[in-house]
């Protein structure tokens, strides 16, 4: 169950939540790129990797905004 008041949590817990962004943001970007590359190979196109990369970056930013707004 999530804490109702993030200010009551320990500093280590909050630091852990922010540290996860160091992994989530690049992972979302790489996964989006890999999906785009896979679709490029499957559909014989040359531009879908860019779409996947952009969607992965957007997913990383969405998670960043969710984490920051949750802890404020």
Image (cartoon, rainbow, N blue to C red):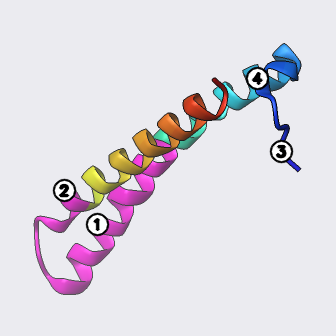
Disc sitting over residue 2 in the figure? 3
Marks 3 and 2, how far apart in space? Answer: 36 Å
Q: Earlier in the sequence, mark 1 or mark 4?
A: 4
39 is within the stretch colored magenta = yes
> Toward the viewer: 28 or 3?
3
Up-down relation of residue 69 to residue 50 (above or below): above
Tell me which residue sits at (40%, 47%) in the image. Answer: 29
Q: In this view, does 55 lie above or below 66?
A: below
Q: Which one is earlier in the sequence, the residue at label 3 or at label 2?
A: 3
Residue drawn 81% across the image and 29% down it: 5
Can you identify the residue that label 1 sits on? 36
In the picture, measured across the screen, residue 25 lies left or right of residue 16, that is: left
Disc 4 to disc 3, how far (Cα)? 13 Å
- Along the line of sight, the residue nearer the viewer: 72 or 35: 72
Q: Is mark 3 on a helix, strand or loop?
A: loop
Nearer the camera: disc 4 or disc 3: 3
Give the percent coordinates (x, y) of residue 47. 11, 64
Furthest toward the top, the residue is 11
**Which is in the foreground here, disc 4 or disc 2?**
4
Quarter of the figure with the C terminus: top right
Relative to 3, residue 28 above or below? below
Residue at image coords 10%, 68%: 46
Q: Is the residue marked by circle 4 packed among few (<14), some (14-19), or many (20+) residues within 10 Å?
A: few
């Amino acid at each position: 169950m999530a804490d109702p008041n993030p200010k009551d949590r320990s500093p280590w817990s909050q630091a852990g939540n922010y540290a996860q962004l160091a992994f989530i943001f690049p992972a979302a970007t790489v996964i989006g790129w890999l999906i785009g590359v896979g679709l490029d190979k499957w559909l014989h196109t040359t531009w879908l990797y860019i779409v996947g990369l952009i969607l992965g970056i957007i997913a990383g930013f969405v998670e960043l905004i969710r984490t920051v707004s949750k802890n404020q």
